[in-house]
Image (tube, rainbow, N blue to C red):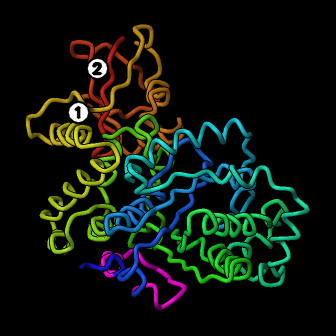
Amino acid sequence: MPNVYNTLVERGYIKQTTHEEIKDILEKEKITFYIGFDPTADSLHVGHFIALMFMAHMQREGHRPIALVGGGTAMVGDPSGRTDMRKMLTKEDIEHNVSQIKKQLERFIDFSDGKALLVNNADWLLNLNYVDFLREIGSCFSVNKMLTAECFKQRLEKGLSFLEFNYMLMQGYDFLELNRKYNCAMELGGDDQWSNMLAGIDLVRRKESKQVYAMTCTLLTNSEGKKMGKTAKGALWLDPEKTSPYDFYQYWRNVNDSDVEKCLSLLTFVPMEEVKRLGALKDAEINEAKKVLAFEVTKLVHGEDEAKKAQNAAEALFGSGNNLDNVPTVMVDDSSIGGLLLDILVEGKIVPSKSEGRRLIQQGGISINDELIKDAKALLEDRFFNDGEGLVRRGKKKFYKIKIK
């Protein structure tokens, strides 16, 4: 029987583990584990996607996931990987974000028949008595040791609030609660959570005299070590209202050649033999691997129908003869004719800002119906519309339809 640990290592997930015996445990036992998702926005983004895949691989081999939504911890904000304090969210904002994130988690994890649990740490954190919490939990943490944690180091230079300093205690307490309630034996998460994970393991040992474990997954970075998932419009969201399935597809279709194999390995269920074959393709042939990557990732996030629509739209734009029905569409009023084209591009979110639009025009990066726009003061003209529709190209591979309402 395959050991999920070997699968995770082969596909490049595992960055650090707390104990060597984890491999044997995952082979001989079926454990309950958890990953936490703080609802700091109303959608997960592609940085969370690798954690969802980590969780899905574990579930496929019979281990039970707990998807922990941080309705309580989001009230404080995780300082890990931050140079400044997170924006304070209201309870109403957090509750809205939690409801949206729950819907997305259900696309990746099977919660039927108790195969996985979906819990919210607000259920135990928000009703804690502060003095009781300090006596039971605070007494188990050494301030000297906490100050050496990587998640706090870079913040100490600019100032770390006492509010954020409590985050490690709260995350550690989550592990303790999940262990007590559900016999949760392992925490998984991004490598930036390592210090918080160690704190939780130590707390469970002190309070319950039990050994629990943790594994971290590599962060999603490109071949230059920079985080992937950033676009001209911001983060690459899993919510189709924030990032359209077409734009999502195009992001993966256009990744660097050197990142294709890594992305196929981490973000799809394509067998590793095929991943290695596709990753070994060179020059023009690597485009076939990129098409597989884009389709498979989009299918996982948005479903097969949306993936096919995005694929057909992309192929239509590159001359395969399919229609353009699935290209993102910007509706413009009749009254916009004669107005500044740059304003329309910004309002339609074809470009993120006027300054970026001017830069693209100056560099020959904007065209309408294959006509290059050379002047940032160009107007939106009737001639750009054929039967009430025009095709805008931004850069080499981004296409948008503009239609008159």
Residue at numbered disc 2: 384
Measuring from the top left, give residue 325's x and y in whole percent.
22, 27
SS at badge 1:
loop
Task: Write down the quadrant of residue 158 in the picture.
Answer: bottom right
- Tag shown at residue 307: none
Measuring from the top left, give residue 194's x and y in whole percent.
60, 76
Query: What residue range appears in magenta?
Result: 6-23
Disc 1 packing (10 Å; few <14; some 14–19; many ≥20): few
Measuring from the top left, give residue 129's x and y in whole percent.
86, 56
Residue at numbered disc 1: 370
Q: Left of 96 or right of it: where is 72?
A: right
**Residue drawn 73% across and 60% down?**
84
Q: Left of 211 or right of it: where is 199?
A: right
Pick whichever, 121 or 50, lies toward us. 121
Tell how many labels: 2
**Residue drawn 26% across and 18% down?**
389
Q: Is residue 201 above or below residue 389?
A: below
**Residue drawn 27% across and 23% down?**
390
